[in-house]
Image (cartoon, rainbow, N blue to C red):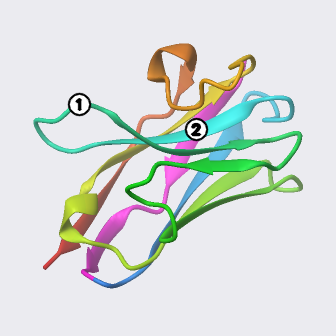
């Protein structure tokens, strides 16, 4: 089974940029949909966006559309979340998740069986 592993979180000032990565451990991401979620302290987990590995199609939550970009590098078996124009409210633990069969339910966390450990992103004002 596939095991996502995130990296690249950190501290950035408001208005800045940061890129987090999600690498595959165990097997390739080929055939999976990769989702990005985030969870701020004391809040529910929130869907950020997703990429279909096969079609390269991307999908975003309204809260990040136009600021965040999801991409993949097949050779490196890695998915990226590029975050621009960051705001303090983007502060959260960011998780990468994988699902083989979603049927279009990109934002439904319960449909993703494989999760990474998360990486902290902190945006200071």
Q: Note whether 85 is above or below 2 in the view shown.
A: below
Q: How many marks?
A: 2
Image coordinates for residue 91, horizontal then vertical, percent: 24, 58
Residue at the front extreme, as displayed: 62
| Horizontal relation, residue 19 to residue 17: left or right | right
| Horizontal relation, residue 93 to residue 59: left or right | left
Closer-to-camera residue (22/37): 37
* Residue displayed at 88% across by 39% down: 54
* Residue displayed at 42% across by 35% down: 117
Write down the residue under mark 2: 35
* Residue displayed at 79% across by 48% down: 77
* Residue displayed at 74% across by 27% down: 26
Query: Label 2 vs label 1: CA separation?
Result: 16 Å
Which callout, 2 or 1, points at the residue further toward the start of the chain?
A: 2
Q: Is residue 22 visible?
A: yes
Write down the residue under mark 1: 44
Image coordinates for residue 102, horizontal then vertical, percent: 68, 20
Q: Note whether 75 is above or below 94 in the view shown.
A: below
Label placed on residue 10: none
Quadrant location of the N terminus in the rendered image:
top right
Q: Is mark 2 in CB contact (under 8 Å) with mark 1?
A: no
| Horizontal relation, residue 23 to residue 47: left or right | right
Q: Secondary structure at mark 2?
A: strand
Q: The magenta stretch spans which residues?
A: 1-14
Secondary structure, magenta segment, majority class? strand
Q: Is residue 113 visible?
A: no
Q: Note whether 92 is above or below 82 in the view shown.
A: above
Image coordinates for residue 31, horizontal then vertical, percent: 85, 29
Quadrant location of the C terminus in the rendered image:
bottom left
Q: Note whether 15 is above or below 63 in the view shown.
A: below
- Residue 5 in magenta stretch: yes
């Amino acid at each position: 089974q596939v095991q996502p592993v995130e990296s690249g979180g950190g501290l950035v000032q408001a208005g800045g940029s940061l890129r987090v990565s999600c690498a595959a451990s165990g097997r390739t991401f080929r055939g999976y949909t990769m989702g990005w979620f985030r969870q701020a302290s004391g809040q529910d987990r929130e869907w950020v966006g997703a990429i279909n590995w096969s079609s390269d199609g991307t999908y975003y939550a309204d809260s990040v559309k136009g600021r965040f970009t999801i991409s993949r590098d097949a050779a490196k078996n890695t998915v990226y979340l590029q975050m621009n124009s960051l705001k303090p409210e983007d502060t959260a633990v960011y998780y990468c998740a994988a699902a083989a069969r979603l049927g279009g339910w990109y934002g439904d966390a319960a449909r993703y069986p494989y999760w990474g450990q998360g990486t902290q992103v902190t945006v200071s004002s």
